[in-house]
Structure formats: C-alpha cells, structure tokens
Amino acid sequence: MGTVQSGEITAESRDEVVASLRKQNILPTAISAKPKIISFKLPILGEGRIKDKDIVIFTRQFSTMIDAGLPLVQCLEILTKQTENKSLAKTISDVKVDVETGSTYADALKKHHKTFNELYVNMVAAGEAGGILDTILNRLAVYIEKTMKLKKKVKGAMIYPAIIVTIAIAVIAIIMIAVVPTFAKMFIQLGGVLPLPTRIIINMSNFIAGIGGLIILLFIIGFVIFIMQFRRKDYGKKLIDRILLKLPIVGVLIRKVAVAKFTRTLGTLIQSGVPILDALEITAKTAGNKVIEESIRETRTSVSEGKTLSDPLVKTREFPPMVTQMISVGESTGALDTMLSKIADFYDEEVDNAVENLTAMLEPVLMVFLGVTVGFIVISMYLPIFKLITLIK
C-alpha cells in the first residue's frame, strides 16, 4: 500500500512534471499550477539582472569544485549560498532541486534558457556525456570572457562618436534657439538688408525655435520607432543587416566581429564534442547578423548532404577568402577546432585595429564638422556688424 505525498516541483509544462515524478516512481493523482504571487515591491535599478560576468564567475567556481572531486549537488549547494547575485542564486537553487530529483545537469539548465543559452546547455551536455564536465566548464568561461571583450570593443567604438555627435547637436541647437534670436532682434532694430548667410541662419533659427523644431523631433522619434519595428521582422532585420555590412568602414568592422564570433563559437563547440550539425545550428542562432545567420544555415544544409564545411562557406561570399582557406586546411589536417580558434584570435586583433582606425578617423571628421558649422553660424551673425562698422568709418 503506497503513501500519499504532496509537494512542489518546478517545470516548464505538465508533461515535464509527470515525467519527473515517474522517474522517482511516484504516480501523480492531481497536478495544478501554483498561483502567482503579486508583489508590490518597487524595482531597484539593476536588481535581478544576471550579467555575463556573473555567469563567468559561477562557471569557473563550479569547474574548480568539480575538478576537486566534489559531488554535483554539493557544488550547487555551495554556489547557491555564496553567489552574490540573488537572481542567479535562485536559478542555481532551482537547478539543484532538478538535479536532486533525477534530471541531468544539462536538462536542469535547459529550463532556464534566459540565463543559460543553447550553446551553454549543449556544451554541458557534451561534457557530461564525455565525463569531462570540469574541462568543458573551463572552456565555457574562457569563451564567455572573450565574447565579453569583443562586445566591449564594439561598444567602445560606438560610444565615443555618439557622445561627440550628441554634444555637437546640443551646442548647435543652443546657438540656434538661444543666441541667434538675440542677434536677429538687434539687426531688425538697425534696419537695412542683411547678408545672405545671415538671413539663412536667422530663417533656420526661426524654423527650429518654432513649430519646425517640434516637427524635426517628432520625425526623429517616428523614424527610430519605425526602424525598431521594421527590424523585428525577419525581412526587415535581413535588409538592415545587409545594408550595415555594405557600409564603407562600419561594415568592415561588423563583418570582422561576425567572423570572430562565428569561428570562436564553432571552434569551442567542436572542441567540446558537440556534433558539427548541432554546432552550426547553435552558431547560426548566436550570429547576431541575419545575413551571416542565413549563410551559416545554408552551409549547415550542405554539410548535412555530405559536403565539406569550407566549400559552402565560399559560395555564400560572406566570409573572407583567408577564413575559408584556413578552414579547408583545418578540415584536411583533422584540426578544424584548432584552426577555428586561431582564426578567432586573428580576427580579435583585426577588430582591435578596426576600432582604433574608426576612432582615429571619426574624431577629426566630427571636429571639422562641428568647427565648420559653428564657425559658419558665428561669421553669419557678425557679418552685419562688420558691414555696419565699415559704413560708420
């Protein structure tokens, strides 16, 4: 005669609950979803967000504990208590409960896809199957760290120009709205025909200070919203990504970042024992560029039909010849993962150089633009004064 038990279990669906209970030889008689608890606690800025840095620290600590021979559940218990990020600590606690009830570590992580992506889960699964979980976790930590550095480089390249452009627009707007109208009133009192540059600047100032400024602001907001909505659709994202790749200098940087990310991800997955087709599927999902993603998917289809990796990559025309040639050499020598890692390291340096060149080029261009614009406004405002001084003499 069995005993009646009751309790709670975390799962994505009713079927997962049933499967988990059957693994424990428990026959479910009634299953119901736990009611949601409504909390009126005010959110704190940054609270609840799990950063890549938190994942790296957790992964490295977990790898060290596994390498030291500690049981999986004990490792998770220790990390739950010492993890500073409360959201990550809660996630680790949930993973521990799933592992205790019979789930594999990879299956337990899979339920928290917002924290642990498909690449992370598949590499952990390969590590569990091969008995080298500590090694895989260490590779994951290295991969995430290098990906973080790549993101930081790209953000750094974009932040400086954005700040300069914002300051330039703010300075020009202040001059046109606050300074020019003062001069305009003085010129009206003096009378006479104003020089053409002065009239142009005064008319622009009146337009910006009046209804025109509101129209421009609404147009900019509407354009940004349109681009955001358009990019949410597959064809929109593909079109925008294709345009970005064809831009003279920014496009080169974006392509180098995409190549570095593709080779780093694929090399890490293959090195960890993930099958090539699964590795290509995961790499496509994490590409970050729709054009590159479709090229990888086309390559995956060709590989599934028995072709090599390098030939379909050449046909896509999205990857530089050096990359496809090195991949071909890696396939022929049986060291594809090593070759992919070398390509990734090379393109990491290329991204560094591209960022430096972009910053070095944009700085003087933006300064010249700001100087010419402000200079033209100032000269236009002083032309009538110079003319008046000449007449007085």
Image: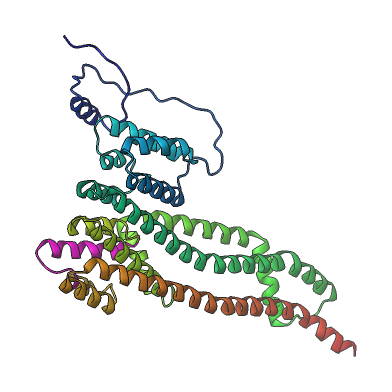
Question: Up-down: is 381 above or below 143?
Answer: below
Query: Residue 386, image x and y in percent?
Result: 81, 85
- Nearest the viewer among 162 and 230 is 162
- Nearest the viewer among 12 and 161 is 12
Q: Can residue 248 be seen here? A: yes
- Nearest the viewer among 121 and 230 is 121
Check the image and name the residue furthest to the top. 1
Quadrant location of the N terminus in the rendered image: top left
Residue at 60%, 65% (x, y): give it: 166
Q: Main secondary structure of the magenta part?
A: helix
Q: In which quarter of the image is residue 115?
A: top left
Check the image and name the residue furthest to the front. 68
Query: Residue 111, image x and y in percent?
Result: 30, 39
Query: Residue 330, image x and y in percent?
Result: 21, 72
Check the image and name the residue furthest to the right. 393
How many labels sit on residues?
Answer: 0
Asked whether, in this view, residue 9 is left or right of residue 220, the answer is left
Question: Up-down: is 342 above or below 26?
Answer: below
Residue 287 belongs to magenta span: no
Quadrant location of the C terminus in the rendered image: bottom right
The range drawn in magenta is 289-310
Asked whether, in this view, residue 354 is left or right of residue 101, the answer is right
Residue at 32%, 24% (x, y): give it: 33
Asked whether, in this view, residue 215 is left or right of residue 174, the answer is left
Question: Up-down: is 135 above or below 337?
Answer: above
Q: Quadrant of residue 254?
A: bottom left
Residue at 80%, 72% (x, y): give it: 188
Query: Residue 222, image x and y in percent?
Result: 49, 56
